[in-house]
Amino acid sequence: GIQVEQSPPDLILQEGANSTLRCNFSDSVNNLQWFHQNPWGQLINLFYIPSGTKQNGRLSATTVATERYSLLYISSSQTTDSGVYFCAVKGRGGSEKLVFGKGTKLTVNP
Amino acid sequence: DTEVTQTPKHLVMGMTNKKSLKCEQHMGHRAMYWYKQKAKKPPELMFVYSYEKLSINESVPSRFSPECPNSSLLNLHLHALQPEDSALYLCASSPQQGQGAGGANVLTFGAGSRLTVL
């Protein structure tokens, strides 16, 4: 099945810093979603982005489908951005389930 | 506030107990999901219901029994669980499910039910 790798596994920032999280996948995808899981376990969908670029406030994402990667940008980070960021993909023609990466744990210090 | 509501938020049960987790959504979504998440791991898919029919069962042990009484409700019945079943159980929904659904596959998660099996 499709493989998903996220990097870095852990990231520590000072408030106000910018960061880039990466998601590599092993096959063509027709569905890619970024999620943020807060320290209490709530998973929030950030972007549905199988290709192209989207922006939502301080967050933006770019997926280059032909090169099999996606990037999540966080600008001017805040302590509330802390948590785990997951990338999840669904391969074309394969299993219908969304495959999650192992996540990037982000800690933003005040 | 999440639009997918899960109850209870916390559950402690013995290995001989029978309990149920409940999930409700009123967004008109036709696909509902159960995920299991262990600490420091990504969510793992357990079951998918599409139009109230079970469409995916990820070889989950029979001590977990899903039920979809209607398009808004999803239950997970628990019986004879083991301590290793302790985890965060997440419910999610999406407008539709399947390879051709595109953006209609976008998942909305509930806040989860944290289960401890003694």
Image: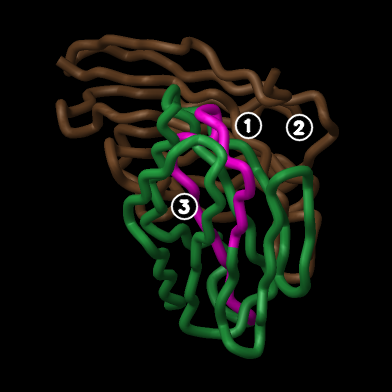
Chain colours: A green, B brown
* Cα distance between the residues tagged 2 and 1: 7 Å
Instruction: Answer left or right for A90 relative to B89.
Output: right
Residue with the most extreme right position: B28
Residue A48 point in image, percent of width and height:
72, 57
Marks 1 and 3 share the same chain: yes
- Rendered residue at 42%/60% (across/down): A101
In magenta, the rendered stretch is A72-92
The number of callouts visible is: 3
The residue singled out by tag 2 in the image is B71
Residue B28 point in image, percent of width and height:
85, 34
Instruction: Answer left or right for B103 relative to A11.
Output: right
- Rendered residue at 40%/52% (across/down): A104
Marks 2 and 3 share the same chain: yes
The residue singled out by tag 1 in the image is B68
| Dot 2 and dot 1 residues touching (CB under 8 Å) | yes
The residue singled out by tag 3 in the image is B57
Amino acid found under the numbered disc labelled 3: Asn
Q: Is residue A69 above or below residue A57?
A: below
Q: Nearer the viewer, residue A45 or B91?
A: A45
For mark 2, name the chain. B
Q: Quadrant of the N terminus of chain B?
A: top right
- Mark 2 falls on what kind of element? loop
Residue B93 point in image, percent of width and height:
68, 39
Locate residue A61: give its quadrant.
Answer: bottom right
